[in-house]
Image: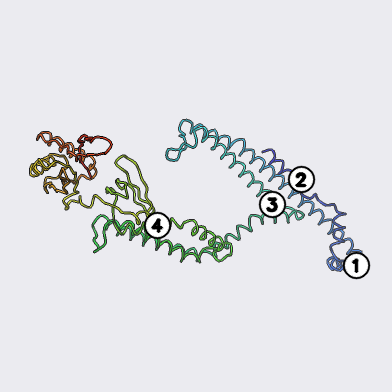
Amino acid sequence: MKYAIAMLFFCAILVPMPASAEELDAGLDKETPVTQLDTLVEVDSPSIGTEAAATDIATEAGEHELGFIARLGITLAIVAGQALLIWLIWAKFFKFLSNKIIKSCKGRIKPFSIHKLKLLNPSQVVNIIRIGLNALKYLITALQLYITLPIIFSMFSATRHIATRLFGYILNPLRNILFSAIEYTPNLITIVIIVTVTRYVIKGLKFFAIQIEHGKLVIPNFYADWAKPTYKILQVLLWAFTVAIAYPHIPGSDSRVFQGVSVFVGIIFSLGSSSAIGNLVAGLVVTYMRPFKIGDRIKINDTVGFVVEKHMMVVRIRTHKNEYVTFPNMLLLNSSVTNYNTSSDENAEGLIIHTEVTLGYATPWQTIHEILIKAALATNYVQKKPMPFVLQTGFDDFYARYQINCYTKEIDKVPHVYTLLNENIQSAFQEAGIDMTSAHQYKVESSSESPKDLIKTIQTPTVDTA
């Protein structure tokens, strides 16, 4: 504050001091031609004209000195007033305001955080408030000085050009901005109209997309799950079209700098997003192919899980072990995708799960079929209608292969259903007194140097689950 006040008084000292009568005479002799002076003081008598001229010069000098003293007094009053105002702002107003804010905010200020990331604690927030108040104080003082100095300099002709220059530093940019804004107004109105029309068109598309997604509006051969991605595609295209139309109306759009930056950004985007563009296009293809939707249980290559996220770039699935696996859309186009939910809709019979067992020929196949069907019907989450059925898939040398098939709509519980089904099959055969082990072929090896060795028969369970 003391430096600001000192600057004000220093500028007041710089103003020119009043000139004496002799200096005025000398200045008048130097600046006013003789012909003009003669014209001004021309009278009938040369002696009377000389005395009148001297009297006029003395009067003018006195008036000039009185005017200078008045302007000097006004200048000192302005300096004193501004110094008092600066002191009041620094010592009174901002000190009172700072204490008031700190006291009112004490205990009420919470840590500043973004989501769960804590950036500032309460004390740091208070310090930032103090720094902001100090910056505002210095800004107001600088603005006061900048306005006061030209006013002081403009009071005197010797320093008036400095005032004009100081005012020009602010007024010229403001005038240029004002004239540029006036000239730009038609283009601004054009851009506002273009953006407004685009926004209302996008709102209309969003309304229709919501109606189609909820099934309130039906378009032939257009599926409900196409509504949201189609709306997003149209939204991007409309905004791109809007930018292309509004681009010529943007200030500086025809400058070489603006064009160079646009070309540079376009090249960087093209070079760095080749794979991203490929995934984006693949995402569009996958969207309209409709191989799956959110929540479906699918199999991609050897990974089985539920679709939890489906974006234009990637698809993310969650396995039964709660593992999240991300697949780029380009990979999906080159991979086989199995959707287990397509057979579990309300109007469908359900997904067929199956387990294969092998049993010897000593047990009648009718008995085996009956036991397998009974075990399937006793399994939770297995549909009673349609009925489970058995397929006899092959004959080996010592046993036959049987496959039990049953329906379920609990796709999210498939591994658990398989476990229950296998448990029930094992329990059903134990209750029937049938051994599920199948004898493998005897293997005999002979050698001319040693007697024949009989290899023991190997008894192994052969239950295959798919």
Residues 9 and 205: in front is 205
Residues 81 and 400: in front is 400
Residue on which the image places disc 3: 150
**Mark drawn on residue 13:** 2
Residue extending furthest toward the top = 107
Residue on which the image places disc 1: 45
Check disc 4 and report its element: helix, strand or loop: helix
Q: Nearer the viewer, mark 4 or mark 2?
A: 4
Image coordinates for residue 367, horizontal then vertical, percent: 8, 42
**Pointer 2 local density, CA inside 10 Å: few below 14, some 14–19, many at least 20:** few
Residue extending furthest toward the right = 47
The amino acid on which the numbered mark 2 sits, given as a three-letter code, is Ile
Mark 4–mark 3 distance (CA, rounded to whole Å) = 61 Å
Residue 278 as seen in the image, left or right of residue 228: right
Residue 374 as seen in the image, left or right of residue 331: left
The amino acid on which the numbered mark 4 sits, given as a three-letter code, is Leu
Mark 1–mark 2 distance (CA, rounded to whole Å) = 46 Å
Q: Are marks 4 and 1 in contact (CB under 8 Å)?
A: no
Residue on which the image places disc 4: 280
> Which quadrant of the view contains residue 264?
bottom right
Mark 1–mark 3 distance (CA, rounded to whole Å) = 48 Å
Image coordinates for residue 149, horizontal then vertical, percent: 69, 49
